[in-house]
Image: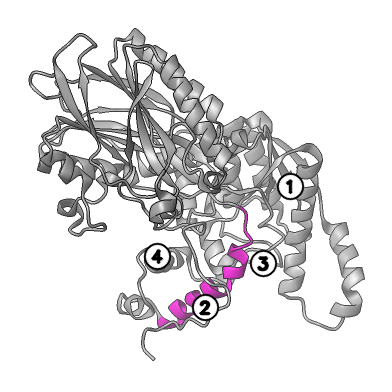
Amino acid sequence: MKIAIAQLNPTIGDITNNAQKILDVAQKAVKENVRLLLTPELSLCGYPPRDLLLYPNFVESLTIKLQELAQQFPPQIAVLVGTVTPNETAKIKGEKPLFNSVALLENGEIKQVFHKWLLPTYDVFDEDRYFEPGKELNCFQLSLNHHSEEIIKIGVTICEDLWNDEKFWKKRSYQQNPLEELVNSNINLVVNLSASPYHLHKPKLRTQMLQSSSYNYQVPIIYVNQIGGNDDLIFDGNSFVVNEKGNIVLEANSFREDFKILEFDLKQGKIPLKPINYLPLVEEEELFSALVLGLRDYAKKCRFTKVILGLSGGIDSALVAAIASEAIGAKNVLGVLMPSPYSSEHSIKDAENLVKNLGINSHILPIGNIMNTYDQILDPFFSGTEFGTAEENLQARIRGNLLMALANKFGYLLLSTGNKSEMAVGYCTLYGDMNGGLAVIADVPKTRVFSLCHWLNRHEEIIPNNILTKPPSAELKPDQIDQDSLPPYEILDEILERHINAHESFEQLCQAGFEPTVVRKIFNLLRRAEFKRQQAPLSLKVTTQAFGRGWRMPIASATGLSSKP
């Protein structure tokens, strides 16, 4: 029996075109004599649909389109389609109104519908807001063809349903383990339809988890994942197949649509493919590919064809320009240089060299005269005071206004270029350099920005060498460098990683050898900058804990630094 994996990139809410994608790949599969086609979780509406699910006509459209698809599929193929279905007993039993479902379509009919059991409500997930968990065992029987008596029993799981294996995690996050219950019902094969968002190292984690599960339960698992960027979330694909011994025998590509076919031997109850070596991408390549996909899809799905960004001659804007060039093409990128009297000659030259290396468009808008005008207007208020943060921020806000004007006038998507380290401690200007429609690297720590740029230069100079070697600086006052205000980035980023991602306390960080005064300063900056982060543009999520929908901190709070009174 031939089984196919369709690694698709749906657009949320675009039911018609998503359905056409599924139909096209089904027709392709039929030509290869495929008996069963697998598509990702919620492949018909895209994941996550969020509050679109609150609109009855949206759910009704899914129901109608699913019925149409069933009639359009060739009769010789069975297809598993991810969709949303109504919970008919919700009002009677006081349950959630919908199910996160997978429908089995065959021979012009919706043969069976399976519901997701485990509904994640952590980090970026809020499925319990919309869905009722499934309660019935999800499995079906499929014959080799309509005239065959040879039958395979297949267990269906949906994304999180496979993420509760206590043998792998050493704990249970939910009371039920759908995989365990399916194996106890004597299934021959498990399929998992997923929309699993990306973060660095997650593809490797998934493979290790499912290798462990397939080995422990002695059952082959076929895993199919969505790809693409949907708002802040990036989906990496990396669909794969593991046999009953826990060996990977097939894998799909990363960060692009793919189509793979395998055979299941009905007589032996096995997938007769030889194990392959799983070779994850180099971290920098994986991260860069994710950021490129996230930007490309955000621009495409929001109907932008061109992007604009400010080029300071610094490393952050250089990396964002390189990502944008790869994502939508250099000819569609405009970099704007906006030097002030405090901008160094080498920064202007570095920005110009970057423009040349990337082949992007550029323009220079000096802001010295605008700064003078602001000084004159504000003189009645600022006269007799010392030059400080307010004056520095004016420069960033002038630049932000100019970029927004160009973006509005010509329909560009404005890219914010700040990194995660800056966002964490508030080393950024609200309504200035934080302006933008998308913050491309706002989940990338400064140290990782450097490593990405070094990786980009592995074969040829893309990021000018001087950008990589000079001390980072906002250049908002004479001879300014970042380390005037912040600890060295190596120290800052490690403290932020351990506190934000691993939730280490003040005491734990001090016990690890960090200076208490440095830790206290960072904690204070992190807390005080929360109001900025909640007004920041959408940022692409590439770490386990981004400053986005999964970060839910209060702004007005009095949280102590220490767990001690």
Secondary-structure class at tag 3: loop
Foreground label between 3 and 1: 1
- Residue matched to label 4: 494
Disc 1: which residue: 337
In depth, the one of 102 and 498 nearer the eye is 102
The CA distance from mark 2 to mark 4 is: 16 Å
Give the amino acid at mark 3: Asp
Q: CA distance from mark 2 to mark 3?
A: 26 Å
Label 1 sits on a secondary structure element that is strand
Magenta stretch: give its range: 516-537
Q: Quadrant of the N terminus?
A: top left
Labels 2 and 3: the sequence-earlier one:
3
Q: Nearer the viewer, residue 542 or 370?
A: 542
Residue 524 percent location from the top left of the image? 52, 78
Q: Earlier in the sequence, mark 1 or mark 4?
A: 1
- Residue found at the very far front of the displayed protein: 92
Q: x and y percent of residue 457 in the render?
A: 48, 39
In this rendering, the count of numbered labels is 4
Q: Is 532 contained in the magenta span?
A: yes
Q: Residue at x 61, y 69 (%)?
A: 531
Kind of residue at badge 2: Asn
For mark 1, does the 10 Å Cα neighbourhood hold few (<14), some (14 to 19), or many (20 or more) residues?
A: many
Assign a secondary structure to mark 2.
helix
Q: Which residue is mark 2?
A: 524
Among the 4 quarters of the image, the one containing residue 464: top right
Give how far across and how far down residue 204 sits, in percent.
28, 43
Which of pointers 2 and 4 indicates the residue nearer the eye?
2
The amino acid type of the residue labelled 4 equals: Glu
Q: Which quadrant holds the C terminus?
A: bottom left
